[in-house]
Image: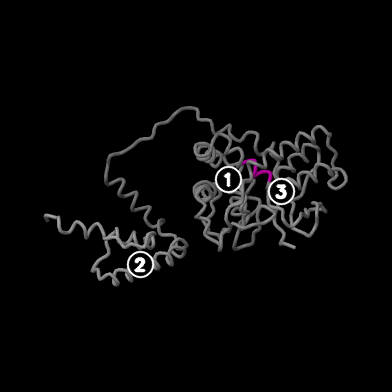
Amino acid sequence: MNQKSELALASAVMRVFARHCGSDLPDLHVSCHDISLPSVEGKNIYVPVAFGSRQSFLAACTEILHNSLDKFGFAADPKEVQSYQAFCIGISSMLYAEPGPPMDSPASFGFMPTSFVLIRDGVCPALGLPLDDFAVQSCVMPGDFTCDKDCLRISCEIHDPVVEAAIMIKYFVERHDPRLVAVLVKDDAFRRYIHNFLNDSYGPISSSLLLFLLCSMSGLNIESYGADVFESSRPASVKTAQTSSSFWLFGLIEKMLAPSRGANPHIKERWAPVVDALYTAVDKERRRKGLTGAPLEFMLRVQAGSDSQGVSSPLIQSMLEDSRSW
């Protein structure tokens, strides 16, 4: 049996339907068992061992829709059930994709550019939170993610930057206080920021998808927290930014920003072994050939490996030495 993981996206989508029917739905968990067909018991979805995240999503939606009265206490019209099941199949192709390669070890969430920028420039200013780093790892699992205090492990089938960002923002905010998610989605500055940043980067529905996932995954009422979401984002007039040609002004701004900038230690830690190995190989090959320096072409050849034909062709620099006039 595998470790339980959160089935947050299925919980989010099915919670909307349950509230439409006058009921509610708890957060669901999923785990693999040696069974032939999926089943649901309380908050737990049990799936066959070979199931991935998308299969678990569809299994959970199907089980809830067809056992809503017996196991979740709400009745639904059969036509609505059929229509919503078709919707779940369609949205699953938006939320999930073919599994990507898993990560061997956790990395800083700064390696997820969209999530990092949204948290740094949108979430932290809106809530007044410090930009605390946390570890992220992509893994094979039947659910969407598992999390603890030190690491967030996300399914390899979740590739979409917006879906990934919704999960990471929820995790980041709830580490401080779960109630802050409701404050965040109501914040005008945050709504304007995600509207401008996401819609320009990923299309016109990206910011709506992020807000929908944040609200529904956190158990918030979509109608109350999302109906007026972009009303304040519509500018009344177009404003033109003022610019200055003063070199000293820009220099002062750069000097003020300098203390907050710096190298990410996680990047250096991950790349140091690769760089050291390359420099060692270059130095060894340089000594073997009796060269006093290491031209760029020579280093590129060492990095690329041995010649496929087994022939050691001369360097272009050596070929041009006799014909140079300087």
> Would residue 269 appear left or right of 243 to someone viewing this image?
right
The mark closer to the camera, 1 or 3, is: 3
Say which label, 1 or 3, has the lower sequence index: 3
User: From this viewpoint, which residue is outermost toward the top?
Assistant: 237
Q: Label 1 amino acid?
A: Asp
Kindly report the secondary structure that dominates the magenta region of the rendered protein. Answer: helix
CB-based contact (under 8 Å), mark 2 and mark 1: no
Q: Does residue 100 sit above or below 266 in this rendering?
A: above
Q: Nearer the viewer, residue 223 or 164?
A: 164
Task: Label 1, secondary structure: give it.
Answer: loop
Q: To which residue does mark 2 refer? A: 279
> Would residue 130 appear left or right of 66 to someone viewing this image?
left
Q: Does residue 102 sit above or below 67 in this rendering?
A: below
Q: Nearer the viewer, residue 218 or 125?
A: 218
Name the quadrant of the C terminus.
bottom left
Q: Nearer the viewer, residue 93 or 258?
A: 93
Label 2 Cα neighbours within 10 Å, binned few <14 / some 14-19 / many ≥20: some
Q: To which residue does mark 3 refer? A: 55
Q: Which residues are magenta?
A: 211-216
Q: Label 3 amino acid?
A: Gln
Q: Label 2 amino acid?
A: Tyr
Q: CA distance from mark 1 to mark 3?
A: 17 Å
